[in-house]
Image (cartoon, helix red, strand yellow):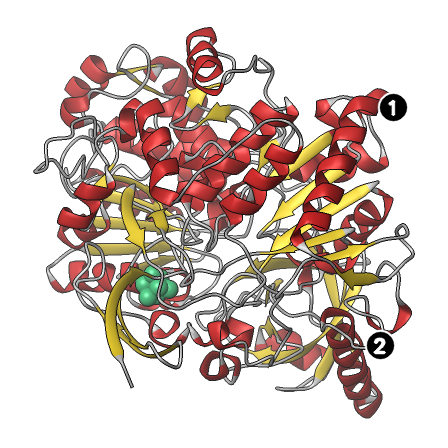
Amino acid sequence: MTVKKIVSTCVYCGAGCQILFTVDDKANRIIDAEGAPGHSNDGTLCLKGRYGWDFLNDPQILTKRLTGPLVRRNGRSSPLEPAGWDEAVALVGDRLAQIKKESGPDSILCTGSARGPGNEANYVMQKFARACLGTNNVDHCARVCHAASVAGLLVSLGSGAMSLSVPEIEDAEVILNIGYNGPDSHPIVARRIVRARQKGCYVICADPRRTETARISQKHLQLKGGSNLALANSLANVIISEKLHDPDFVREHTKGFEELRTLVEKYSPERTAGITGLDPGEVRETARIYASSKHSVILWGMGVCQFSQGVEVVKGLANLGLLTGNFGRPSTGVGPVRGQNNVQGACDMGALPNYYPGYQSVSDPASREKFEKAWGVSLPDKPGLTLTRVPEFVLHPPDPGKKIRAYWIFGEDPAQSDAHLAEMRETLRKLDFVVVQDIYMNKTARFADVILPSTSWGEHEGVYSACDRAFQRVRKLVEPPAGVLTDWEIISRVSTHMGYPMKYKNAEEIWNELVGLCPSFYGATYEKLEKLGHVQWPCRSRDMSDAGTPYLHKNGLFATKDGLGVFSASEWRPPVEVENEEYPLTLSTVREVGHYSVRTMTGNCRTLRNLEDEPGWVQMNPALCESLQVGRGELVRVASARGWCLSRCLPTDRVRADAVYMTYQWWIGACNELTVGSLDPVSNTPEYKYCACRVEKIDDQAGAAKHVADEYQRLRLEMLVDPKGVGAGARGGLAA
Ligand code: SF4
């Protein structure tokens, strides 16, 4: 056995932990993983980092690894069949060229991928969309998570990223976690919160559930779902009315204070108690504690962003930091903690409809001219379409000429992860051409005309961006299966076929091109990443000792055009769909620590897969269970105005009696059958955290259990490469 040791970056969350892998070179297998001394993890790992690499061995627990292209040769009702790369590339290139010719470049939308592919592949995909197709219709799953943070913070602070670094969290004096449950989403970040508390930090949790974060906090504000902005405005009200703000900081470094003061005047904790359900005294005390320190930090996650008012809440939280001067020093500021391992990176690389790489606006003539010159084309000047509006632009386009006809889905699974799944399935069926580029068969791939199999994390080189703007190398650990290509190579081959040649030799060559076009990334060379381990943007110098910028807005100089932080005040409004007689409860989607995203990776890791199985659980207050006469483990039917699914009852007093919670990775217990597609008007992020639902008791438990087993088997057959009717399962054509 030849053993080699390689350090790489974890593929599972934005904490960006460094892992030392032991690889049996001869057998081409990873045999062990342990924590390496990385910037954020300091040698520690959570269970996903420790055990989450087994999917590379293709154990085929959930689905099967894609090892060669699949195409439908005779239209959408024909089965997927194996094809060579030349045929698959030509099919994709010719069909996209035809659709572009018939309906224009804006009839096509491509996604980036926030998961394994890495920054270089995202750069190449957005370049393909813009330079080859001629559209800014490129987006990725940040749209369904932290797009609200980016949109809100860009207005308030001029930068949409975490203003501090993960290691700085442990030296904060006050941490307000709102809609953020680090122990489930980023366990190694949560470890920093625990350490902070051990060092004397006052930890506060604002969350409708009594989460693990609530358990490690001194104060838990168990607010009503959908009331975040009422709370943020109330905290601002107390800080201003009790004169707890920093008048010098406000005068010298901000604008818009008077407008904020006027708006939040009516948001006293006593007046908002009916909205938040919180004791006004507790809210006042929270504001006083937060404002008492110059090392106060606010951390948030999906419990802030996945609401139809997410952007306004983000601005409301930025207001608190601006009021109290909590920016521009170590261990202070705001932390929208990015979820997926490279969702920060996919944004950094411009897989967004309004930004080129490095957050250079497509509407800015100087930026556009720079990229036109570099890429040798003229570029569109209007921002593209967000991916959450694809259903609208397929099923009900504002005019027939604006229809989306082709969708290239790269490392995402909208048929499992997007809100209102029935509408998404209809959308996928109605599209003229669907390309799926992935490592595993997934629910979306069942609707594809062409499936392009790529190398996985662990099988290619590249760079990821951690949640705190740290670029880190990801390295090849094992050889990929024969028959797959790297993501950037697949996209480059299609581009070349379409007449816009891209002939990169390796990931480093792509990286060199992109950092040369992005002043904030210019100093982050491969050479420096090798030497220092990480570089945090902005990093403008190639001096080998410059590791970039650990915290932003130094000396109160914000990244806005005039350098001032901007107070931005909005009125609270209720979620779009509220409880009613037919659906008296609210549903919120949440995470669990053992599974990642739609589970195609963790569901194919033997250790992680054993933690839980279909159809997952619905968290219910014991009083609700009693009223419905259902007990732990009993199958229940959860329904909303859009659909239903089966789940298992999990009684827990950690949730309020008026709300239920489900994780979104299960196929049978697919809570996105229920979620609502209402979008934040600015970020276009769906309101995953709030819709009306009901839970029904099922008398025929044996029949329900059979349904779960049968449905699971049916889906597995559709997603496994079936020897009788390759790829499309027993029925051959597009999935039901
Ligand atoms: Fe991986 Fe995140 Fe766990 Fe670190 S905290 S090991 S990055 S999943």
Residue located 31% across and 25% down the image: 516
Residue located 45% across and 37% down the image: 347
Out of 349 and 70, give the one closest to the viewer: 70
Out of 512 and 618, give the one closest to the viewer: 512
In the rendered image, which residue does mark 2 sit on? 724
Q: Residue furthest bottom?
A: 702
State the image coordinates of residue 121 (x, y, percent, origin top left). Answer: 47, 43
The amino acid at mark 2 is: Lys
The answer to whether 1 is drawn above or below residue 257 in the figure is: below
Q: Ligand 1 quadrant?
A: bottom left
The amino acid at mark 1 is: Pro
Which SS class for mark 2?
loop
| Residue 357 found in image quarter | top left
Total marks placed: 2
| Residue 698 found in image quarter | bottom right
The answer to whether 688 is drawn above or below residue 150 in the figure is: below
Report if residue 229 is visible in the image. no
Q: Which mark is residue 566?
A: none
> On the rendered structure, is 332 left or right of 730?
left
> On the rendered structure, is 133 left or right of 266?
right
State the image coordinates of residue 326 (x, y, percent, origin top left). Answer: 21, 33
Q: Mark 2: few, some, or many residues within 10 Å (few <14, many ≥20)? A: few
In the rendered image, which residue does mark 1 sit on? 400
Report if residue 565 is visible in the image. yes
- Locate the N terminus by quadrant: bottom left
Give the Cα distance between marks 1 and 2: 39 Å
Residue located 52% across and 33% down the image: 502
Tell us which disc is closer to us: 1 or 2: 2
- Locate the C terminus by quadrant: bottom right
